[in-house]
Each structure stands twice: as structure tokens, then as C-alpha cells.
Amino acid sequence: MSKKLLITEKPSVAMEFAKVIGENGQRKNGYIESKDWVITWCVGHLVTMSYPEKYDEKLKLWRLDTLPFIPKEWKYEVIKGVEKQFEIIKNQLSRDDVDTIYVATDSGREGEYIYRLVDQEIKVQNKDKKRIWIDSQTEEEIKRGIKEAKELSEYDSLSDSAYLRAKEDYLIGINFSRMLSIIYGRKLANSIGEERASISVGRVMTCVLGMVVKREREIRNFVKMPFYKISGEFIKDNQDEISLNAEWKVSESSKYWQSPKLYNEVGFKKEEDAKEFIKELKDKKIVVQEVKKSKQKENAPLLFNLAEIQNECTKRFKIKPNETLEIIQNLYEKKLVTYPRTDARVLSSAVAKVITKNLNGIAKGYKNDEVQGFIKQMREEKFSTNLVKTKYVNDSKITDHYAIIPTGQGYENLEKLPSLQQNVYNIIVKRFLAIFYPPAEYEKLNIALDVEGEKFNASSKICVKKGYLEVLKKQKETSNTNEQNISDFKVKKGEVLDVKNYEIKEAETTPPTRYNSGSMILAMENAGKLIEEEELREQIKGAGIGTSATRAEIIKKLEKINYIEINSKTQIITPTKKGEYIYDIVYSSMPDMLNPKLTASWEKGLEMVAKKEIKSEEFMTKLENYINGKFNKLVIRR
């Protein structure tokens, strides 16, 4: 009688599938077997690309005349230490009574690659191969994944992209690391006081190092510049019980429009010029030019993708992005949240239509008084759960997976988890609940004054309805510290005011801030731009540096090889002395490797392969031409 074989990425995941399939399978050495099923598992990667010396023993020596190394036929091998599990999988995949293979490695590019390498090494033939693609490890999602499994061949383009990513990292890493080490290794060793030194280069890693070093040097070379702002305190009818504080800003009607005396639009370079300006304002007529009241609504932020939750956890808990990923991966495996390695911050329309299942699950199972209070409020005030036409649902912004949300299940596992993991879960729940709450509402007031061509402005923004802020507890800072005075200062357009006094406020320029491990993840996601404004970040998001699955590991590797340091308390990133020397070497020899746009363009190319927009051969040709071109230039220069 024929059997079906299911292969997962980890043993723990295999156990969950075995429970759902529910055939009282017998646990054996490295697999589980029941009447109709065999379930086995990888332990992460089992197969890897062979080093150059496996092609030719002579290539073990690092020599310029053997570079660049670009194989025509690629060699792979089983990773040492996992040979036993590989053989178990091989035996099960090769069984005559197994006619169908269900691939249930993680639903992403790297998960696809893990299985494809195993399949390639074993040379599995004459069996039907199906791909299970799931968004969570809940029972119904696993059942759906098995029932709706597609032919593995439908994921061939994703597999092609995975192979190309590995080849690109291999070729750039091996060729340029060897080349730069041969040319500059001795010089580097002398500079850092070591007997010998090698230079490690990576497609993404080197670019990230460049971002860290450039930022550090901007800070180091920064010179504070004072500048002088003008403000006025204005009163009505010479009654100074209530006054209005307003700031001057240059306008086209100003005497100082485009003047070289200004540092920026709100300040002078020299204090004496600011003092002279105040003298000029004396006895000038002050007229209310505009009194503008408006209301503003602000919706809850989009849901978490991996980059956003990593940044949030770095800010809140001062933990590294790879720690956050490990936590959320565990929450996923405990059925508590959906798939973590996602770039999407929205839901699919299909999920949005059944989202009450998640909410009901949280209401029934999550023993958290604060969260239960939010759900009670949602019910009492009858908040809408119809998300389909909101900004939180957009099928066009989803590739492999939707945003990270709570499943509403797995609560039997939650209390057993460490407090940090419970706290991270709570953040995900709150971000999810916030999208069902009404927007926060603000009343804005702006008073514009004209002092014979010179413009002064006072503004305030007061929250009148908290809305989603009830959940996220994130009161927005208002734009003026004197809101009460401004709102109480009753004036109309055209009224003439008196001045109580003008004053000079000294300010100074500030250096850029260092990256921390969380903000670096966001900068990588946005191709080297650290964009603090969430809405803008979402609008410009395109191909980033690395992927959601790899960014944390890149930062971890840079720290491990002593190119950067990460403060354990603050998570602030700084380059090491060695990292700065490496940067200088790369900058002088192949500066485009430090350019986030170039690195992002390679990632975009891989994405295009996955989407069948370009063929693998086109990508590989461009890669080989890039590597050959670099070597030709450097050898000639040398």
C-alpha cells in the first residue's frame, strides 16, 4: 500500500503536523510512521555549497591567478554533523512504498531552498511532489495547507531565486574576500597590530558596514553650529493676563528672504543680526493674519512585519533583531502568531473576511486583563470588524505572507513561555486590536501674525478623542508647549495686537544619531534610508538590502567578526577599528559595494526571478559580468 511522506524544516514542526494528521504514528529514529503517512524533518540546512578546493585542491591556496572563481557546474555536499539525519531522510524519500512527497519546510525562499538542496542531492525521482504553504501552525491552517497543496513545480521560480541568492553570496564573498585579502591583507594586519588578517566581504554585509562607518564619521566630524531664533509674546488690548507666544519664520514678504545672514528659515547665523532684527520690529504694527481651526483624524499604524517588530523590540526591550526573530519564530511554532518572516504590513482580503475568528480566540483564551478590557470596549461600543475596505487590507502588497498577527490560538503554550516572550506577544496583540479602534482625533489651531511683512506663527494640536491610542498608549506630542495659552487667546482675523516683548532663543545644530540594531533593520528594509516617519516609510518601501529572513543574521555576523560593536544595554552600533580599515579598503578599491542602491538592485533582481519577470540565466550573466569586470579593473590598477 502506498504512503505519503511529509518533510518539515524542524522536528518540532513535524510533531505539530503529526498531531493534526492524527493517525497515532509511531516515533522511530528520525521520523514518524503511521498507516498512510511518513513524517520526517530537516534540522535547518542539511546541504551546502562546496568550497573551491573541492573543485580543485590547488584552489585551497589564495592566489590572484586563480581568481575569479566561477564554476560552470556547481558542487554541493552534506553539512558535517547532520549526515545522520540526511541519511534518514534519504532512506525515507527513496522508499518504494512512498509515492507522494509533501514539502512543508518554512513557507519562504530559504525554506524552499532547504528542501530543494536535499531533493537535488538525493535525486528523488518518479514521485509526485507537492508544496504545503501555510501562514500559521494552527490545526485548521495545517489541514488547509495539506488539502490545498500545489505541485512543487509551481514554486520553481522561487527555488531559482533561492539558488541564485546563494550563488551570488558565494561568488561575491569568496572572490572579493580572497582578492582584497591578497592585495591588502598585510597592510590591514599592520594597521590593526595583528600578525595576519583576512578581509571578509559580502553582498549585504559590506554595504551595512558602510552605513555604520559613514554614520560614525558624520558624527565624529560634526561641528555644532549655534543659530538664533526669534519669538514674540503678544497680548490683546494691553491685557497681559493671557499672552500668545509665536515663532518667527522667514517668508517671501520678509526683508530677510534668502538673506545670507540666515542659518535657516527660522534663525540667524549671528546673534548681533538677530538683535538688530528685533530692533527693526519695534513699533511695527501687529495684525492677526489668520485664525485657522481644523480637525485631524489619525488611524492606527499598520500591522507588524518582521522589520517593524524587530525595531519595536529593540526600542522597548533593548534586544537584538535576531533575538526578536527567535522569539517570534517560537511564538509561531507554538501556534500563537502567524508566519514571522514577512515583509507585508497588511492582511489579505481572504483573511480579513474571517478575522473575527482571531478576535474570538483572543477573547476566549488570552488571560490578560488589559487586553480583555479592550475587547470588552470593542463589543460594548460595537466597533466594526469589517476591514476589507480599510488600509489594513491590500492583496497587492502581499507576496508570500501577510502581516504578523495573533492567531487567537495556542494559549495552552503561552503561560509556559518566559516573560519576555509573553511581552512580545502582547505587543503583537495590541497592534492587532488597535486597527479595529476608531482613529484618534485632534483639534488643531493656528494663529498667523503679520508684523509689517514679517510672519509669526503659533500653533497647537490637542487630542480630543483617544481612539486607537487607548490601546497603544502613545499620546502624540503636540506641536507647541503652550496649547492652553493658544486656545484661550481669543482673536479674530484683522485684529491688531500689542507686543509684550521679543526675545532671542539660541539653538544649535545636532549631529545625526547612531543606528541601533533595530533602526538598522529598518534602514536595511528601505535600501539604506533610516526613515522615522512611519507613513512615509510605507510609501517609499521597495527592494531593500537583504530580506526579512536574513537582515538580523547580517548584523549578527558583522558583530561576530569584529567589524562592529553593539552596546548590550542600548543596542547602539559603532564600527570597530578593524571595521573602519575594512571600509577604507573597500572604498578605495570597489566603492560601489558600499552603495545601498546597488545592493538593493541585486535583491530586486532576485525578486524578479521569483516573479518570473526575468530568467535565471539573465541574472547569472549580469552577476558574472559584474565580477569579471571588477577583477579586470582592479588587476589593471594594481
Image (cartoon, rainbow, N blue to C red):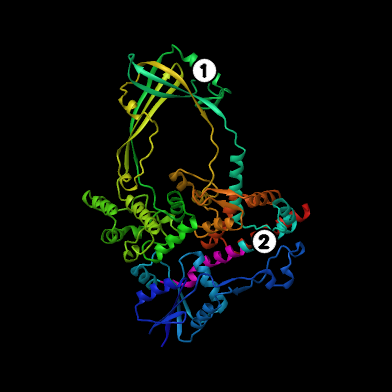
User: Crowding near pointer 1: few (<14 within 10 Å), some, many (20+)?
Assistant: some
> How many numbered marks does the figure carry?
2
State the residue at coordinates (55%, 64%): 161
State the residue at coordinates (32%, 64%): 411
- Looking at the picture, tell me which residue is in the foreground, 256 or 503: 503
Q: Quadrant of the N terminus?
A: bottom left
Residue 169 seen in this snapshot: yes
* Magenta part, dominant SS: helix
At which x and y percent is residue 515? 53, 47
Q: Nearer the viewer, mark 1 or mark 2?
A: 1
When asked about the image quadrant of residue 100, the answer is bottom left
Looking at the rendered structure, the secondary structure element under dot 1 is: helix
The image shows residue 280, relative to residue 350, as above or below, that is above
Q: Which residues are magenta?
A: 149-167
Looking at the rendered structure, the secondary structure element under dot 2 is: helix
Q: Which residue extends farthest top?
A: 283
Q: Is residue 352 magenta?
A: no
At which x and y percent is residue 360? 27, 60
State the residue at coordinates (53%, 79%): 84
Residue 400 seen in this snapshot: no
When asked about the image quadrant of residue 240, the answer is top left
Q: Earlier in the sequence, mark 1 or mark 2?
A: 1
The image shows residue 321, relative to residue 153, as above or below, that is above
Q: State the residue position of label 2.
A: 624
Q: Label 2 amino acid?
A: Glu
Q: State the residue position of label 1.
A: 275
At which x and y percent is residue 122? 55, 79
The image shows residue 449, relative to residue 573, as above or below, that is above
Gap in Å between the C-alphas at discs 1 and 2? 64 Å
Q: Is residue 164 magenta?
A: yes
